Image: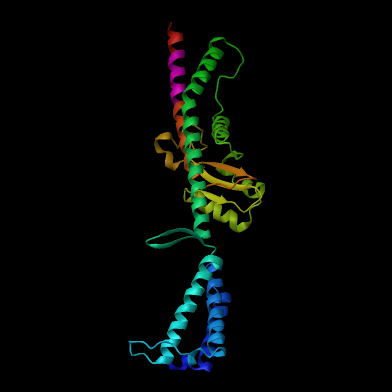
């Protein structure tokens, strides 16, 4: 380190540090954040400023008080100036480059706030609020399902007993769409839903403008029984499989007792205005499962009641 105490040595070190910082800026992969790369460049330039100051002002020739540590005078002067410049540089870095503000003073020192930390905290708070809305909307939707089927039950029984030409069946797929739309209304969300049979999967590629890679990834995810999400399209989409309890499969060997062998329905959530959450698929699946369980229960009750009517 002796060469640092010479004018040319300090300049060489500063220039090498600058070259290193700028190479690091452009050298892939960029694993550091932009602010941290700016920080590296700043300290390299700050080193050059120190070199100019130290040599131009001939600081090494100033008369400092002697030290008791046995350090040569020129080295002692260098150490003091490096420490002072380091403190000034760190303050500039903390208050300007990293956009930190002074939060508090105390016995433990000065508390600083970080702009990036505040952004992270804000995002986390927004996410917590969103999950609270999801949970509340899920609860409200599930809560109205029993009463919904009580109304359907009474209407279907009346249609059968009155011997009219009114519908005496439930379009399950249509009802699954309706109950999911109810959930989104309660969440004040503009997300829309579509349900397809697996044999129509190619419609997703054309309807939502997926390229070959995106569509291949979608099919791979569905094969793994997981969801595919894409928030980069005009129509942001979330696609996931749903193994229905009640919809009829073309494969007559399938049954509700062996649901994992059935071909799933494909649920598509899409929106032009808001990003989708991959975890929201589990909320939708839970609502649909409760809905179909109540549907099966209602159908059994209708059959039992109609049988009693015939006996009487």
**Predominant SS along the magenta part:** helix
Q: Residue furthest left?
A: 69
Classify 42 as above or below 232. below
- Magenta span of residues: 295-306
Instruction: Point out residue 226 in the picture as x, y percentages from the top left corner.
Output: 48, 49
Residue located at (59% from left, 53% from top): 215
Q: Nearer the viewer, residue 57 or 65?
A: 65
Q: Is residue 191 left or right of residue 80?
A: right
Residue 79, percent across and down?
43, 84
- Reply above or below: 27 against 187: below
Identified at 44% across, 42% down, the residue is: 261
Percent x, y for residue 93? Answer: 52, 70
State the image coordinates of residue 161 (x, y, percent, origin top left): 53, 10
**Nearer-the-camera pick, 117 or 224:** 117
Q: Could you say which is closer to the camera, residue 56 or residue 30?
A: 56
Kindly tell me whether residue 84 is visible in this rendering.
yes
Judging depth in this view, the residue of 295 and 249 nearest the camera is 295
Among the 4 quarters of the image, the one containing residue 217:
bottom right
Name the quarter where the N terminus is drawn. Answer: bottom left
Does the stretch in magenta take in 302? yes
Q: Which part of the image, by quadrant, shows the C terminus?
A: top left
Res. 29 in view: no
- Residue 214 lies in quadrant: bottom right
Residue drawn at (61%, 16%) of the image: 166
Residue beneath the point at 53% across and 72% down: 39
Magenta stretch encompasses residue 150: no
Decide: is 284 above or below 42: above
**191 on left or right of 148:** right
């Amino acid at each position: 380190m002796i060469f640092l105490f010479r004018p040319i040595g300090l300049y060489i070190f500063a220039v090498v540090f600058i070259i290193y910082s700028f190479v690091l800026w452009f050298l892939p992969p960029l694993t550091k954040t932009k602010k941290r790369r700016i920080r590296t460049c700043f300290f390299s330039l700050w080193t050059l400023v120190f070199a100019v100051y130290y040599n131009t002002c001939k600081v090494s020739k100033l008369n400092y008080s002697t030290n008791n540590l046995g350090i040569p005078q020129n080295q002692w002067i260098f150490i003091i100036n490096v420490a002072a410049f380091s403190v000034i540089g760190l303050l500039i870095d903390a208050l300007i480059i990293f956009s930190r503000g002074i939060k508090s003073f105390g016995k433990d020192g000065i508390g600083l706030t970080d702009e990036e930390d505040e952004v992270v905290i804000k995002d986390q708070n927004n996410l917590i609020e969103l999950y609270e809305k999801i949970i509340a909307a899920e609860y409200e939707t599930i809560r109205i399902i029993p009463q919904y089927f009580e109304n359907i039950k009474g209407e279907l029984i009346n249609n059968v007993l009155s011997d009219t030409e009114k519908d005496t069946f439930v379009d399950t797929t249509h009802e699954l769409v309706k109950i999911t739309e109810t959930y989104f209304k309660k969440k004040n969300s503009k997300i829309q839903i579509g349900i397809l049979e697996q044999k129509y999967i190619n419609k997703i590629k054309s309807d939502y403008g997926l390229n070959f890679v995106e569509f291949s990834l979608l099919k791979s995810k569905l094969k793994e029984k997981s969801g595919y999400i894409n928030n980069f399209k005009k129509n942001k989409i979330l696609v996931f499989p749903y193994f229905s309890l009640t919809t009829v499969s073309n494969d007559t060997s399938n049954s509700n007792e062996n649901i994992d062998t059935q071909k799933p329905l494909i649920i598509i959530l899409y929106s032009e205005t808001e990003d989708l959450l991959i975890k929201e698929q589990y909320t939708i699946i839970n609502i649909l499962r409760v809905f179909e369980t109540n549907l099966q229960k209602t159908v059994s009750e209708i059959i039992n009641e109609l049988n009693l009517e015939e006996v009487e």
